[in-house]
Amino acid sequence: MTERKKVLSEVKFWTPLRLASTIVILGLLAAFGVSSCNSNDPEPVSSSTATKPTARVNAGLTSLPRELLNAENKAASGTTPIKLSDYSGKVLFINLWATWCGPCRLETPELVKLHKEFQSRGVEMIGLSTEDPDASEQSVMRFVREYEVDYQIGWATRELAQTLMQGRTSIPQSFIIARDGRILRRFIGFNPETTPDQLKQALEQALVEKG
C-alpha cells in the first residue's frame, strides 16, 4: 500500500461517528475507574486523585459535637434549614457529595434505592453537598431532578464537612449514625460492585442496635 493510500485509509477509518464513540467509551472507562474525588470545598488540595473505597469504624471521631448537631445547614428545598439534632433518636445516614463528582453520580441511584427500602424502617437519609451553596444552587437542583432524589438534600457547613472528613477530602463519604449519636461506620469512595451491599449491611446492623 502506498503512503497516500495508507493515509486515506486511516482518515476513512476515523469517521466522526467512530471518533465520537471512542471518546464516549474512554469517558465511561475513566468514570468507572475512579472511585472517589477530592473535594476542594472543605479543604483545598493541589490535585484530584483516585483512592480505593474503604469502609471502617470512624476511629478518630466517635460522635459530633453539640454545636455541629445544632448548626443550620442550608436545605435545597424549603426554607427550614437542616439540623442534625432534629434526627436525634433515629438511625441517620449522612452522605457528603458534589454535583461535579463522577463517583457521587454513580452512587446516587443506589442511595435512592436504599432510601426507598429503609425509610419505612426509620432510617433518615441526608445528602449534603460540599459545594458553595450560592454558586451551586442551580446545579444541585438539576441534580435532584435528574436523579429523582427523594431524600433530604442540602449543603454542609464548612465546619461540619471538615469535622466529618477529618482531613480525608475524598468524596463521596457516607456516615451511619446510631440512635444515640455514635458514628458507627464511615465509607469513603464508591465501588458499584461492593459498596451498595456494604451500606445495606451497615444499616441493618444500625437498626438492631439499642441506642
Image (tube, rainbow, N blue to C red):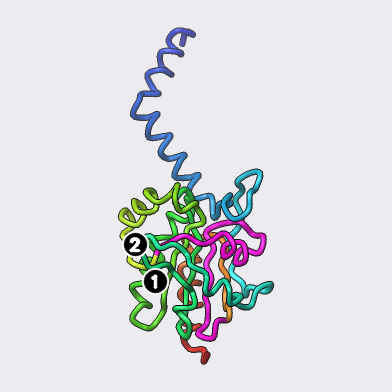
| Residue that sits furthest to the right in the current view | 60
In what element is the residue under mark 1? helix
- Residue 151 versus residue 11: which sits nearer the camera? 151
* Residue 32 horizontal/vertical position (percent): 48, 50
- Residue drawn at x 47%, y 58% as measured from the top left: 129
When the figure is inspected, residue 136 is found, relative to residue 159, above or below; the finding is above
- Residue 117 versus residue 18: which sits nearer the camera? 117
- Residue drawn at x 38%, y 61% as measured from the top left: 109
- Residue drawn at x 47%, y 48% as measured from the top left: 100
When the figure is inspected, residue 77 is found, relative to residue 182, above or below; the finding is above
Magenta span covers which residues? 153-181
Question: Mark 2 belongs to which amino acid?
Answer: Ser
Give the side of residue 133 with respect to residue 169, left or right. Answer: left
* Residue 210 horizontal/vertical position (percent): 51, 92
Which mark, residue 114?
A: 1
Q: Which residue is mark 2?
A: 77
